[in-house]
Amino acid sequence: PYARGLLDALPERAFTPVPGTPPELGDLPPGCAFAARCALADATCRTTRPPLTEGVACHRA
Ligand code: SF4
């Protein structure tokens, strides 16, 4: 969902900006780094970091 939001921010797609600001790379949150800016984030997203796997690793995938 976050990647979809980034793509929707492209000027040729009527520029729908992703709300908020990017996470501080030196101070990442405990869960998904994009949870604060993702419209589909839930409690799991805020507490559990999605595993790095081949392909899609999002909790919603
Ligand atoms: S893991 Fe959760 S917060 Fe992160 S991109 Fe997926 S739905 Fe959004």
Image (cartoon, rainbow, N blue to C red):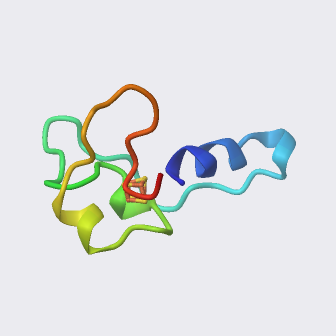
Image quadrant where residue 31 sits = bottom left
Q: Which residue corresponds to the image point at 41% horizontal and 53% vertical from the top-left?
A: 21
User: Residue 13: image x %, image y %?
Assistant: 83, 47
Give the position of the N terminus as an image quadrant.
bottom right
- Direction from residue 41 to residue 40 in the image, left or right: right
Q: Which residue corresponds to the image point at 37% horizontal and 56% vertical from the top-left?
A: 59
- Direction from residue 42 to residue 2 in the image, left or right: right
User: Residue 54: image x %, image y %?
Assistant: 38, 25
Ligand 1 visible in quadrant: bottom left
User: Residue 9: image x %, image y %?
Assistant: 68, 47
- Direction from residue 44 to residue 7 in the image, left or right: right
6 vs 22, nearest the viewer:
6
Q: Which residue corresponds to the image point at 17% horizontal and 53% vertical from the top-left?
A: 29
**Residue 46 in the image: above or below residue 54:** below
Image quadrant where residue 37 sits = bottom left
**Residue 55 in the image: above or below residue 57:** above
User: Residue 57: image x %, image y %?
Assistant: 38, 41
42 vs 16, nearest the viewer:
42
The mark tally for this picture is: 0
Q: Can you name the residue that lies furthest to the top here?
A: 54
Q: Can you name the residue that lies furthest to the bottom here?
A: 43
